[in-house]
Amino acid sequence: MRQFKEEVYYNVTQAIDLMSAVKELNKFSSQELGKLLRDSENFVIHYTSENNMQMTIDVEKLACFLPLHLMAVLISSNRDEALYKYLLCGVRLLYSLCDLAPRHARLEQILLDDVKMSEQLLDLVFYMLIVLGGFKEENYQSDSISVAHSSLVACSLYLLTGCISSQWQDLVHVLIAHPKVDIFMEAAFASVFQSVKVLDLRLSTKNSDSTCTVPVAELINYLCLQCEASLQFLQTLCQQKAFRERLLRNKELCCKGGVLFLARAILNLNVAHPHLQSSRVGATLSRLKAKVLSILLSLCEAESISYLDEVASTPRSLDFAKSVALQILELLKNALSRDSKSIFSCSEKRYPTGFLQLNAMRLADIFSDDSNFRSYITVNFTKVLTAVFSLSHGDFLSSWCSSDLPVKEEDATLEYDSFAAAGWVLDNFFSSGILHPKNLDFTLIPSVMAPASYAHQRTSLFVKVIANLHCFVPSICEEQERNLFLHGFVDCLKMDIVKALPGSDGSKATNVCRNLRSLLSQAESLIPNFLNEEDVQLLRPVTTVFLPLRGEPIRFKGSVKFLCWQEGLNQSLSDIIYGGGRNHNPKGDYTPRKLRSQGFALPPLSRRGLKAVHNRVRHRVVI
């Protein structure tokens, strides 16, 4: 280790100059450094420090040696406040130099064009993330160290876009070509996981430590923003096909649940104390959850390797994946069972909350369409679906059959500023002067989605989940899955669950029938832009089962028989639903039969071909 340090420094004087330069120059933004360079000769800055010391700094040498210098300090120093402060100063200065480089040819040649320097910068970021990913629990209680940790995670990640490439495709190409790409992936997810744990601790604690002079609300807001910035970086990487496909080959993150551990930690984030609640923090937590669900979606939608097959490769990882799926369903239940208008106080500023509900529904569609998770989703989500159908007809129409929802989600991208983020920590936790804590906010760039498109996507996902749960393929599904959804649906209708959602009333049977008919009509109008014919064909029999007989509403009492209605359905898939049972007539006629234990009969499905139905509940058949 000493030998490594000797290779970095030519002599003691140079080491001292580097440390002095880092401590003094990190305060200057790239614009301010640019002005100093314009006023200098031969890239040498003459500068008077706060202690009235005259300093001469060769910026060219500083840029050449800074990455290895920071690496040496990171390797040889104790993990204490002094180290975190110095690393923040160093990374902040390096970020400013990289930001300045495109406007100065000599800096650009050193920092951006030199292959060896790029390798050093990558090694610095990789090792920084390894250290940050191993953050020890005893440091959680220290506000200065834990806040510096969260800032360093985000700043280290965004240093890649500053020193390697601001184009994500180019950055991904460099990362996946690196021989230590697996180490980077694991360290990046681990370090973000540690930042989330720090945030979770602060959200569940009334007060910060006694030495903290920053109001706890501002501290929590800062930690939220750092976590969002770091997670957004991972999200953007996972949206790149090449990176996503490479990540799926990482056993630690996929087979052993590394990504799921991060997802569970974020989904568990909640404000424990009312005095810490605000629209700003609430919206940031919602965006965090939406972003981690987006990462899961990206992995689930990969083409070459099945993420769900990877997590289902062992009983332990499958159980863990199901527990995360249950969290997603619970999140979706809460989203559907509250009045979105009441989330924020009328007096508070509104902030984008991210596509949390939409992403949760997309994952529910994927999970319910996978043979490893379908039964689990059926058992745990049918009650929520039943409660939705129990809404008053007017509320159901406005929520699921309208192109203009009363309230819709809004997404946004955080415009992260590493210089400002690091400076906030240095000013508020490591400054020797009088502190005047200031709030730090980053610009949120809205992600615009047309209201009609959002509403139609939401409704189509609702229909797809129902279609997935209702579909039964004998060669793939287990016998106990046969009509499991409809049995559960009827059982839930018999229960007193109408209070699960606002707007429910006592006319449950009438509401269910009218709402099902309206949903079917809306679904038919969404073909082919948002739904395909197969989805609607699978919804239609669910609807017809509960149509009233002779104009009388269905009574959900005891063992009442539900008769099916099959007018307009000319073909049969009873061999798919019933496995080619004795009641199936090859001529297409169908005699209603009672389902086991429930006493109602199902209408036939229109045949779209066995192959198409197989794709609805696939055992890793990519649609």
Image (cartoon, rainbow, N blue to C red):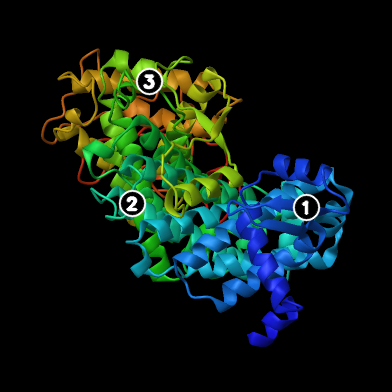
| SS type, badge 1 | strand
Rendered location of residue 447, percent (x, y) = 58, 29
Cα–Cα gap, marks 2 and 1: 36 Å
Q: Which mark is residue 399?
A: 3
Whether residue 106 is visible, yes or no, is yes
Q: Amino acid at mark 3?
A: Ser
Q: Which mark is residue 212?
A: 2
Tell me the mark number nearer the camera, choosing from 3 and 2.
2
Give me the residue at 13% from left, 32% from top: 496
Give me the residue at 66% from left, 53% from top: 25
Tell me the mark number nearer the camera, choosing from 2 and 1.
1
Mark found first going from the N terminus, 3 or 1 = 1
Classify residue 46 as left or right of residue 367.
Answer: right
Which residue is tagged 1? Answer: 45
Give me the residue at 71% from left, 74% from top: 13
Query: Crowding at label 2, few (<14), some or many (≥20) Cα neighbours within 10 Å?
Result: some
Classify residue 122 as left or right of residue 261.
Answer: right
Name the residue nearer the viewer: 241 or 283.
283
Above or below, 68 against 174 in this view is below
Rendered location of residue 442, percent (x, y) = 53, 35
Classify residue 368 as left or right of residue 413.
Answer: left
